[in-house]
Image: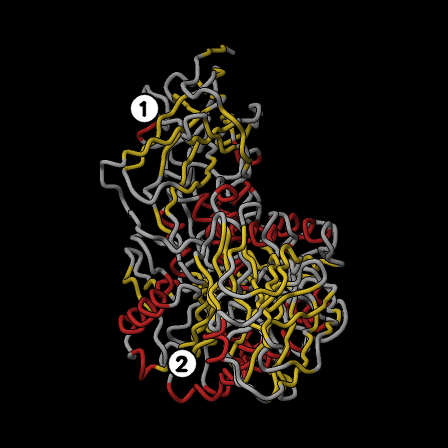
């Protein structure tokens, strides 16, 4: 072994945060950014192939270079937010390297699809093995900039191992740094102007999960986000109960029919683009209808003769890339079948069956992929390791249904269909499948649509995540995922709350990373990702997969063609449901500017609605939520709905006393500047009226109270922390509340 040293060009580095694997985000005193890779020690792992001994990184690294016939070497990736404009490049430096002699490294078999058994593919030593040069040559490479919902980012991959197959020397580089250089004078790829930023808590979490420097870029926000439901005209009445509930719980939901959008895929995409541009809070899209009634999009035919059917295409609304800006799902079926999906979703969200079925899961895996899958795991071990993470974080039992005999909860021999049905009928909240598949079958257990159609799991609905070929092929015929959502027992919903499946032949290793990341989000392994909707879980997993494998064209196909069947806005249940308790006034004056709801469940979302219109929302903090009210009618009832993951929602009403306040409040008080820095000026509609003023922060804590006075007062905000505040003016028994922001 030889050791060589060099010096870094990046000085005065302070650590701001760390990401997964071995990569840290760095920032220097000159406001430059860098990523640094810290490689673990080299571990010799011999594998005998055709009588020769080779180094096999399969059990010591997560992701490998995937150029067929070239050395399979570890690669680690991380993403960062970069400036909105300018040409972005990286300068790569390192601290030292170690050199190991007489090492033979196995070649990659390429990115295989799951209709191929990796062990049956022979190793091929391509032209790289005859070149007297270190492969892959670059210590780090940067992707083209991409846009994710008003945020411009890049992914950097590090290659700490460099191998010369002629001299059989293997180098391990330490302290690799990729320093970012932004030339504002040169036009860059995917530049943006006035990006939306997060806009709601869901995408704030997406950023924190994906970008190493997101914590320094965005303050947490609490908005739920909006949903757009697109349906054939005759489906509108069927989805109406779901739309009403979403609005009631605080997710502003709009229905658009095909007569409004146009029936062709291009027309639908154009409508969504316009809606997104005019509604920056849009977070979810739900299609209702099968392909023949509401078309999915085709990217065309691949060289292998597959048609790339995609719903994710509709959500790619910014930039020339494959990162979706909103989360999209589909209720695929005729009117009667969609009605089943609506009823199941309402039951799951509003009145879940009691018991601990949500804390049990199923892992189904083939006996293949050892040394080739993500993390080098075979399918069964991949599922076992996910199960261990679940058991360590609140789950009570994992059904292990693996081909072969692997001990633990796995029975000897291969899986039979009845084993899967028994597990589901007993009640589970999550099913991970990793193996072979076809349109209507999971091959491990040979579990077909016919078996799904006989399920009896009324009230206990799992989220099914399928890493298999064609389980989501729905453009013609009934896919396996569709069957999970269409099934009934005794004229009541059974089956799954949602199912994710590929519309084409599924890649082997790449989607295993999606499952891994979803598992980490379910168990809370990523701080800040604590509001796990079905769409949030699935697409966060997809973002992570695309980050890890961005150099693989197969990874792009996974993003394009993995379809989520189900409502993406549903909050996934991971624990036995408890009843939410909340208290609030029984009556309020119609001139009220705010309502305070008391609740002991921190982070619960409180929504006030009237006749299906959202009047105001807030998040419980410090035992209460202060809801600043928008416009409403002066008489009748206000609905109060409080929701939180793993709780049964609270629903109550408040009676309004007479006198509308819409025109009154608009004339009573205005304030400026907003956002504020050092002060705000309050302007009363009637400057001669005596008024008192009270300022509260977003937690409801009173930070300012003024004595009654006349005129247009100035309130000093120079000592306020940055954030959102509520100003309430009280005059002659009437109240008006305005929201303002302090920078």
Residue 220, x across and y down, in percent: 54, 52
Residue identifier under label 2: 231
Image height check: is 144 above or below 502? above
- Relative depth, front residue between 704 and 264: 704
Residue 251, x across and y down, in percent: 52, 71
Contact between marks 1 and 2 (CB within 8 A): the answer is no
Which residue appears at 64% of the width and 51% of the height? 524
Image height check: is 219 above or below 600? above
Among numbered discs 1 and 2, the one appearing first in the sequence: 1
Q: Answer yes or no: is residue 482 visible.
A: yes
Residue 731, x across and y down, in percent: 58, 73
Image height check: is 719 above or below 522? above
Q: Quadrant of residue 732?
A: bottom right
Residue 192, x across and y down, in percent: 31, 50
Q: Answer yes or no: is residue 117 visible.
A: no
Image height check: is 277 above or below 213? below
Residue identifier under label 1: 130
Which residue appears at 75% of the width and 74% of the height? 354
């Amino acid at each position: 072994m030889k050791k060589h040293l060099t010096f870094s060009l990046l000085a005065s580095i302070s650590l701001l945060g760390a990401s997964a694997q071995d990569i840290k985000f760095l920032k220097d005193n000159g406001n430059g950014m860098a990523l640094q890779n810290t490689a673990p020690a080299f571990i010799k792992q011999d594998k005998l192939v055709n009588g020769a001994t080779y180094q096999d990184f399969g059990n010591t690294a997560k992701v490998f270079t995937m150029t067929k016939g070239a050395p399979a070497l570890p690669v680690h990736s991380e993403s960062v937010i970069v400036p909105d404009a300018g040409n972005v490049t990286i300068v790569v430096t390192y601290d030292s390297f170690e050199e190991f002699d007489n090492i033979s490294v196995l070649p990659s078999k390429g990115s295989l699809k799951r209709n191929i058994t990796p062990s049956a593919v022979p190793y091929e030593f391509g032209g790289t093995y005859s070149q007297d040069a270190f492969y892959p040559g670059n210590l780090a490479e940067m992707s083209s900039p991409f846009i994710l919902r008003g945020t411009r980012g890049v992914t950097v991959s590090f290659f700490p191992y460099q191998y010369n197959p002629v001299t059989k020397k293997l180098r391990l580089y330490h302290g690799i740094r990729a320093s970012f250089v932004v030339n504002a004078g040169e036009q860059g790829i995917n530049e943006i102007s006035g990006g939306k930023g997060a806009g709601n808590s869901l995408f704030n979490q997406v950023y924190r999960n994906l970008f190493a420097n997101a914590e320094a870029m965005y303050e947490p926000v609490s908005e739920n986000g909006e949903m757009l439901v697109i349906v054939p005209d005759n489906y509108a009445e069927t989805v109406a109960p779901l739309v009403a509930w979403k609005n009631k719980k605080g997710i502003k939901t709009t229905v658009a029919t095909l007569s409004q959008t146009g029936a062709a895929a291009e027309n639908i995409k154009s409508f969504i683009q316009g809606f997104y541009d005019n509604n920056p809070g849009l977070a979810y899209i739900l299609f209702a209808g099968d392909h023949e009634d509401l078309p999915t999009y085709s990217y065309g035919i691949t060289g292998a003769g597959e048609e790339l059917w995609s719903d994710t295409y509709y959500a790619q609304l910014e930039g020339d890339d494959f990162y979706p800006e909103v989360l999209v799902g589909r209720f695929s079926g005729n009117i009667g079948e969609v009605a089943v999906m609506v009823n199941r979703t309402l039951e799951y969200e509003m009145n879940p069956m009691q018991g601990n079925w949500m804390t049990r899961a199923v892992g189904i895996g083939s006996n293949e992929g050892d040394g080739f899958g993500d993390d080098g795991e075979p399918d069964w071990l991949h599922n076992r390791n996910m199960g261990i993470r679940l058991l360590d974080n609140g789950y009570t039992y994992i059904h292990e249904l693996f081909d072969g005999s692997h001990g633990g909860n796995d029975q000897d021999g291969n899986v039979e269909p009845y084993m899967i049905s028994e597990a589901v009928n007993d009640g589970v909240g999550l099913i991970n499948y990793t193996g072979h598949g076809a349109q209507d079958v999971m091959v491990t257990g040979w579990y077909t649509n016919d078996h799904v159609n006989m399920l009896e799991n009324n009230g206990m609905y799992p989220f099914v995540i399928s890493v298999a070929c064609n389980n989501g092929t729905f453009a013609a015929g009934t896919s396996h995922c569709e069957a999970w959502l269409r099934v009934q027992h005794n004229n009541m919903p059974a089956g799954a709350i949602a199912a994710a499946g590929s519309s084409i032949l599924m890649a082997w290793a790449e989607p295993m990373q999606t499952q891994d990341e979803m598992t980490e989000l379910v168990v809370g392994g990523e701080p800040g990702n604590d509001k796990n909707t079905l769409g949030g879980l699935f697409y966060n997993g997809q973002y992570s997969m695309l980050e890890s494998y961005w150099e693989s064209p197969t990874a792009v196909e996974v993003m394009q063609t993995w379809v989520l069947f189900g409502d993406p806005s549903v909050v996934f249940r991971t624990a036995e449901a408890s009843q939410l308790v909340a208290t609030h006034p029984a009556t309020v004056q119609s001139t009220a500017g705010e309502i305070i709801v008391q609740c002991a469940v921190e982070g619960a979302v409180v929504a006030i609605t009237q006749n299906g219109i959202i009047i105001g929302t807030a998040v419980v903090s410090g035992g209460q939520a202060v809801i600043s009210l928008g416009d409403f009618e002066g008489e009748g009832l206000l609905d109060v709905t409080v929701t939180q993951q793993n709780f049964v929602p609270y629903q109550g009403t408040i009676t309004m006393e007479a006198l509308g306040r819409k025109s009154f409040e608009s004339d009573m008080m205005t304030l400026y500047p907003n956002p504020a820095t050092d002060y705000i000026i309050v302007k009363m509609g009637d400057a001669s009226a005596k008024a008192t003023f009270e300022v509260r922060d977003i937690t409801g804590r009173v930070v300012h109270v003024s004595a009654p006075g006349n005129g247009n007062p100035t309130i000093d905000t120079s000592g306020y922390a940055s954030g959102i505040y509520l100003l309430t003016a009280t005059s002659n028994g009437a109240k008006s509340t305005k929201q303002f922001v302090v920078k």
